[in-house]
């Protein structure tokens, strides 16, 4: 396959045709934050945290799903990009119920860490109704706290494409969207047993191993 | 749901036609109906439920005989949808999201129904009413 030359943050970069901006940046040691992306799986582009500035493009482009092209000039940390990421983080925090100040596992939450990296404080937006769901601990293998879910769909894809079980889906619409099992029932299913693959893919504290002592940080798959 | 819907097992493309068929039959989509659709298409239940709940025209619980849907998007709002909503509220004595005690009408606010050229517009069941004024509501509701 042909090679493509492009410029990322002032570095001349040569990658194979068809790779994404994210892959090209990673291969050359340039870090772009991601939340919804799963390596080697088809991208969803749901969380928008990976947006970068492409010279000549009207809007910012999602790095995880935009393929490189010859002569492209990309900025991954320009003021425009940082500003957009800050607002994206703020909006995701707004959709959370409550604050993570008193959450002992917050340090394992990628969103929480991104918020401190980008110096995003408490969100300034008010919501009409909080997205609050009671935490579920009836399943011995997965502890679910959907109030912390950012709807990145990594668990849905991990369950379907990696575990091959397909018991998670997104239901409802807009702000009411939610990851459900069956007819929006508690995750207490015969099919969901001793797998825990979704936990490793959850970027926040929405899915966790019931044993609280385990550190999740090392096991999160990028 | 045997004859009217072509039988293509294990087909995701059949999901919406099957759900629409179930809706036409019962006026809503029951859990039994969703289970049957899931079995027929070979899709997991959660996915059938997810698709069903995405569409406001595929209700999962029993609706009243007549469903009044008022557009709450910007063009209708600018052309006086608020007055229409108030008028319906006064006429039926129910708020959006509620149903009358006799089960004749339920009333909901929905997103754009694609009739911006006739704003403010409402739908009662499948019928569209456009270019409305608050006074016309009484007469329209009487015809049901």
Image: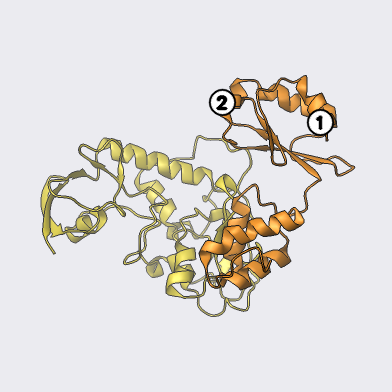
Query: Is A204 situated above or below B8?
Result: above
Q: Position of residue B14 (x, y in %)?
A: 56, 63
Residue at the spot of label 2: B117
Q: Position of residue B26 (x, y in %)?
A: 76, 57
Q: Tell which of B71 and A101 is nearer to you.
A: B71
Q: Residue furthest front?
A: B3
Q: Chain of mark 1?
A: B
Residue A145 visible in rendering = no
Query: Is B139 situated above or below A207?
Result: above
Spatial CA distance of label 1 from label 2 is 22 Å
Residue A169 appears in which quarter of the rendering? bottom right
The crowd level at tag 1 (other Cα within 10 Å; few <14, some 14-19, many 20+) is some
Residue at image location 57% in from the left, 62% down from the top = B15
Residue at the spot of label 1: B141
Is the C terminus of chain A in the top left, top right, bottom left or bottom right quadrant?
Answer: bottom left
Look at chain A in the picture and name its colour: yellow
Provide the secondary structure element on which disc 1 rests: helix
């Amino acid at each position: 396959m042909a090679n493509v030359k492009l410029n990322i943050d002032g570095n001349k970069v040569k990658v194979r045709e068809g790779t994404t901006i994210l892959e090209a940046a990673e291969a050359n040691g340039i870090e772009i934050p991601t939340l919804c992306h799963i390596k080697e799986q088809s991208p969803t582009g749901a969380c928008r945290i990976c947006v970068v500035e492409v010279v000549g493009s009207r809007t910012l482009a999602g790095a995880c799903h935009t393929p490189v092209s010859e002569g492209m000039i990309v900025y991954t940390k320009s003021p425009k990009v940082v500003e957009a990421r800050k607002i994206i983080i703020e909006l995701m925090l707004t959709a959370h119920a409550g604050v993570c100040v008193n959450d002992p596992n917050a340090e394992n939450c990628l969103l929480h860490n991104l918020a401190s990296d980008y110096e995003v404080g408490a969100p300034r937006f008010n919501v009409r109704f909080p997205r609050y769901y009671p935490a579920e601990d009836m399943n011995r293998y997965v502890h679910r706290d959907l109030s912390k879910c950012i709807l990145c769909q990594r668990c849905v894809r991990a369950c379907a494409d990696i575990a091959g079980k397909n018991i998670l889906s997104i239901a409802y619409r807009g702000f009411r969207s939610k990851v459900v099992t069956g007819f929006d029932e508690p995750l207490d299913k015969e099919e969901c047993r001793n797998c825990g693959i979704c936990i490793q893919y959850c970027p926040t504290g929405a899915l966790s191993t019931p044993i609280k002592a385990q550190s999740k940080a090392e096991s999160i798959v990028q | 749901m045997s004859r009217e819907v072509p039988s293509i097992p294990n087909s995701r493309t059949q999901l919406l036609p099957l759900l629409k068929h179930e809706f036409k039959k019962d006026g809503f989509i029951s859990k039994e109906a969703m289970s049957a659709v899931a079995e027929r298409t070979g899709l997991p239940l959660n996915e059938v439920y997810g698709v069903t709940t995405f569409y406001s025209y595929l209700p999962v619980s029993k609706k009243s005989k007549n469903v009044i849907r008022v557009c709450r998007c910007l063009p209708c709002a600018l052309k006086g949808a608020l007055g229409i909503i108030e008028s319906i509220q006064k006429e039926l004595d129910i708020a959006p999201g509620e149903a009358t005690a006799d089960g004749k009408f339920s009333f909901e606010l929905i997103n754009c129904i694609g009739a911006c050229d006739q704003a403010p517009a409402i739908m009662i069941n499948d019928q569209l009413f456009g270019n409305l004024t608050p006074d016309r509501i009484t007469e329209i509701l009487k015809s049901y």
